[in-house]
Amino acid sequence: MIKVNGRDYPWRAELSVKQLLAEMNFTFPLIIVVINGKTVPKDEFTCTVIENGDDIQAIHLICGG
Amino acid sequence: MNLEEIKNSHKLLGTFNYQLGQIDKGYTNRTLYVNLSAKTFAEKPVTELMKQKFIGGRGFGLKLLWDGINDNTKWNDPENELIIAPGPIGGITQYPGAGKSYVVGLSPLTQSAMDSNVGGYFGPFLKFSGWDALEIQGKAERDVILFIDGTKGTVTLEEAPLEELNSHILIEQLTEMYAESEEDKVNVSVVTAGEAAQHTLIGLLNFSFYDTRRKAVRIKQAGRGGLGTVFRDKNIKALVIKSIKIRGDLNNPHDLSTLKKVGKKMHKEILSLDDSQCQMRKAGTTHIVKIMNDYDLLPVCNYKFGSDPNANNITHTVLISKYFNLNGHDECWYGCTLSCAKVINSFKLKTGPYKNKDVIVDGPEYETLSAAGSVLGVFDPEFVIETNFYCDTYGVDTISFGTLTAFVMECYENGVINQDITGGLKLNFGNAEAALELLHQMAKGEGFGVIAGLGIRRMKKLFIEKYGANPDFLQDIGMEVKGLEFSEYVTKESLAQQGGYGLTNKGPQHDEAWVIFMDMVNNQIPTFEDKAEALFYYPMFRTWFSLVGLCKLPWNDIVPADNHTTAEPAKVPEHVQNYVEIYNGVTGSDIDNNELIRQSEVVYNFHRVFNLRMGYGTREFDQVPYRAVGPVTAEEYESRQDRYDRQLKEILDLNTAEKTTEEKVRILRNYREEQYQKLCDAVYLRRGWNSNGIPTLETLQRLGIDFPEVAEVVKKYS
Ligand code: SF4
């Protein structure tokens, strides 16, 4: 199990940041991903693999409207 | 009829000559007062106290309105006023988004003080013609045009019987009439409403600007709260202003070099990053449709649902590929590199009085794509564009039109009203033709359009009293607070945004607080205290734009490349610092980001007391319809059953398998309604208000607005 924005999410081996965002339907372009307190650069979303137990923040920078 | 004939029919009712004067650090230090009943004019000084406390823009509007009316004034009394004010930063050309002005008056929808922001050139031209605000009171006997000639220092009030009323024709006629040549058109700006503004309570105001590249008069809208209805009630056909030629130093700032420096940095940021961020320069705000649909936040069928597979038909991709005319210059004021004011150069109308005519359409923006689209269950871009055009030219707010039509459609589908009542209109969700016909009826002041044009709050009363409708059901599905229709976001899964709509001064408009993602998606504000802090900071921060004359969009629809490394990326700290520097650079003040918030807090609390003075502004008026909070019907619940069942299990430890949908709807409702009340308590506390939502005397003292007449209002409720 991993945490995504403080909520439980099932983990599986080889799950990348890019896949996770796609599964969550997180399509907004201005998004910051932080894993266990460390920011993942956007160009590393595909190659960054998530470990079981990771705490992930996917912060959408939209204050919209 | 030719223009000469139209012009010759004008009858001069009054003239006022004034010294053009000097702008000093963003202020002209005087406002222009016009009384349409008495046909009189006056120059009012702007005091240091007024500048300190009310800053400008919406702040000046509220202060002038407060002084101009009495406790019993109604929106259609002659004492009601319309005030237009740009703010001290308004009119600079160095930083993007600095041409906004604010319209203030008593709203026919909310019966209290309304403010609506707008682009176009009128606001800055007003300042460059010598005035920090235009204050109009009284009512003309017949249709008039008020003309301010900022090149000569004259104001004239002219009876104007022959011009068209609808905006797309009227703005062309008046731009042509008051400009001396093709080159001079860019120095003229016109404010108009339209035929529907006088038959409905949801009238808007169009503010024009001349697009030299397209050689066309364009418009931006002050849409919310029915201020176009007030305009027509005063028998104003148009306001026209002519300015001296625009230069970068006209605002006479304290320190022009700072404005240039900060502006240059910002332009560079926009030009290098917009393509990889929101693509505002290409798509304008339409890029939000797909995002809202993806995150289940796009209003569909009167906010029952948050997404629909057909929404793909009305996204930015379709608009860019088939409709928008893009030339890289879509700014609604000089110097706005974010350039989001998109336009459709040529659109052939299919209905109404201008059927088969090719017209230019300003927009659609995100809100209109929902209001004239998804919220009605319509996903046809041609219908959205046609509705956009007619709303603008008739002078009707697209947001109120869409949200109230969606309410009507749900009433129709539930048998609250029928074809006998609608005059034959089959107002089912998805019936685009019927919705457009309703709009045309509003313009003609005929049929069911007259009833719909009253807005949701009055329709609820009428349907209950006249047709025996169930008041609880109408209260649940009628998307209005304080009498104003909701703007276009689904808030069911964001408690904070429910407050962002309910705990506002003017009603549910997102320009005050928009915290859905922080709350629902990012889960950054989980506790009541966190939510209350967000509903303190963001409304105050956003209020500041309305005081100084700025557009909100360049604040966070583009962010610096390293924004994510800052302590609070959602606030976009670098841009906040830009604003501090620009304000100081214009006015010569020395504020910091805390003082910026305090400036807003003063006006925000003053507005709250204003509502109180008019008989509103307490907790009871901050309540939201349940449709904004959770699923009203079994249909809604079942459409997102997994989500709601999971919440009932996780939060309330409920065995959902043993419950019917109706039972689950009720249990979820009890829980969510209780949460909303707790949110109100937390927000009131953070804002320095008592448990009834009234600013305490200590709060007024802290902010320095415990003026006798303000304190008096609060004391009455203590
Ligand atoms: S961002 Fe758009 S609305 Fe704002 S000032 Fe620029 S063009 Fe106008």
Image: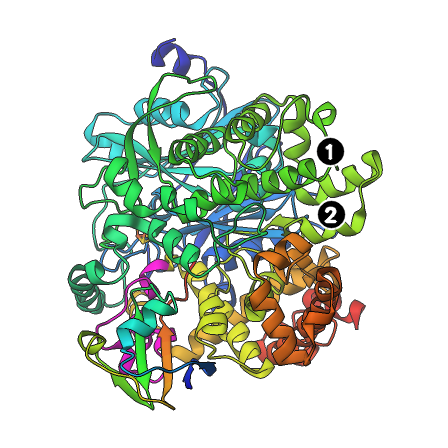
Judge: label 1 CB < 8 Å from ligand 1. Answer: no
| Residue at the spot of label 1 | B417
| Residue B611, position as x, y percentages in the image | 67, 59
* Residue B567 tag number: none
Label 2: element kind: helix
B197 or B252, nearer to the observer = B197
- The amino acid type found where label 1 is placed reads Ile
Q: Earlier in the sequence, mark 1 or mark 2?
A: 1
B623 or B71, nearer to the observer = B623
| Residue B538, position as x, y percentages in the image | 48, 70
Q: Residue at point 66% right, 51% down?
A: B112
> Would you say the magenta stretch is mainly helix, strand or loop?
helix
Q: Is residue B559 visible?
A: yes
State which quarter of the image contains the N terminus of chain B.
Answer: top left
Residue at mark 1 shares a chain with residue at mark 2: yes
Category of crowding for the residue at label 2, using alpha-carbon neighbours closer than 10 angstroms: few (below 14), some (14–19), many (at least 20): many
- The amino acid type found where label 2 is placed reads Leu
Q: Is residue B77 visible?
A: no
* B582 lies above or below B350: below
Which residues are the magenta region? B553-580
Q: Relative to residue B461, is residue B288 drawn left or right?
A: left
Q: Is residue B18 magenta?
A: no
Q: Residue at point 56% right, 70% down?
A: B496
| Residue at the spot of label 2 | B474
| Residue B334, position as x, y percentages in the image | 24, 49
Label 1: element kind: loop
Q: Quadrant of residue B23?
A: bottom left
Q: Quadrant of residue B504?
A: bottom right
